[in-house]
Image (cartoon, rainbow, N blue to C red):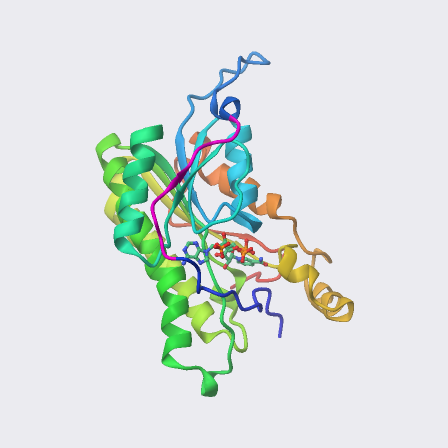
Amino acid sequence: MVTPDCDTHDTDQPASTNQTQHPTNQEATVPTAPTSDQPVPAPRTVVVTGANRGIGRAIAERFVANGDRVATLYRGGDLPDGVLGAVADVTDTAAVDAAFTQIEQELGAVEVLVANAGVTRDQLLMRMSDEEFTSVLDVNLTGTFRCVRRASKGMIRQRRGRIVLISSVIGLYGGAGQVNYAASKAALVGMARSITRELGGRGITANVVAPGFIETAMTAQLPQERQDAYKATIPAGRFAQPDEVAAAVQFLASDEAGYISGAVLPVDGGLGMGH
Ligand code: NDP
């Protein structure tokens, strides 16, 4: 059984303090002059949760490169140049709300939300405790809900917005030892589709990106023979780079994707086809 998200991430991090880390490279958030005949799209305020590492970091870097104003809700660590950091744990409603308020005050109304922060705590079904189940749900599902609820306020007011939820191939394919994680990620599909039905008439789209096996520090730690075994089951024959997920996210957040909503876009090299 292929389990791309098989690592256990510790959620015992310092409590939220709602401090703000200012961009270390202000120039990166300022739109530059056009380099071709194409008009430069107006910069938007983009929030990516968990931009301090992994896939979230690659997503934030892409939006910065696009000239957008980028902020993150994060628990600590260093951020890419040009990303405004608001410290918040997504399990803390008050901290999430305060972080969005801070971001809106500093960068303007949020137009794009990428709910990326996520954890795994793998365990066999019979051994999984209530706490192992609910703690994963609290970050991956309820944490996403907290961010979407707060971000949607401004989007409704602006009558435009892009919501991208980072799920996983495991959500629809399943994964042994991942009942908690798969349930949390599958639920994001229902969430995006309900948002679409509720807010689709207000210029807001909500989509899901479902990554497969992405090359991160986590996958690099796997023994070579296990990496080879996983790769053998992926039609593309390789893992993906975080930026390949970021490219899909950027497309769904673009003007060109304005008529795409409630969709699940796999970025998995064909691993989850048909699921
Ligand atoms: P990482 O473990 O590298 O990063 C996870 C990010 O989520 C970190 O920034 C982490 O912050 C943040 N986070 C976790 N819990 C919380 C919390 N309670 N509040 C705020 N932030 C939190 O994972 P990846 O980059 O690999 O994964 C990113 C997303 O992509 C996740 O949702 C994951 O489920 C999904 N995914 C990943 C795949 C892969 O192969 N890597 C495959 C499919 C889906 P901190 O640094 O403080 O822990």
* Side of 150 where 11 appears, left or right: right
Above-or-below relation of 184 to 202: below
Q: Which is more toward the observer, 54 or 187?
A: 54
Q: Which is more toward the observer, 116 or 22?
A: 22
Which residue is at a point 38% across and 76% down the rendered structure image?
131
First to last magenta residue range: 15-25
Magenta stretch holds residue 253: no
* Side of 62 where 44 appears, left or right: left
* Side of 19 where 94 appears, left or right: left
Residue 258, given in percent of the width and then of the height, sits at: 39, 35
Residue 49, given in percent of the width and then of the height, sits at: 43, 47
Q: Quadrant of residue 42?
A: top left
Which residue is at a point 30% across and 33% down the rendered structure image?
104
Quarter holding the N terminus is bottom right
Above-or-below relation of 157 to 37: below
For the image, the number of numbered tags is: 0
Residue 195 visible at all: no
Residue 105 visible at all: yes
Q: Residue furthest bottom?
A: 126
Magenta stretch holds residue 18: yes
Q: Which is more toward the observer, 262 or 107?
A: 107
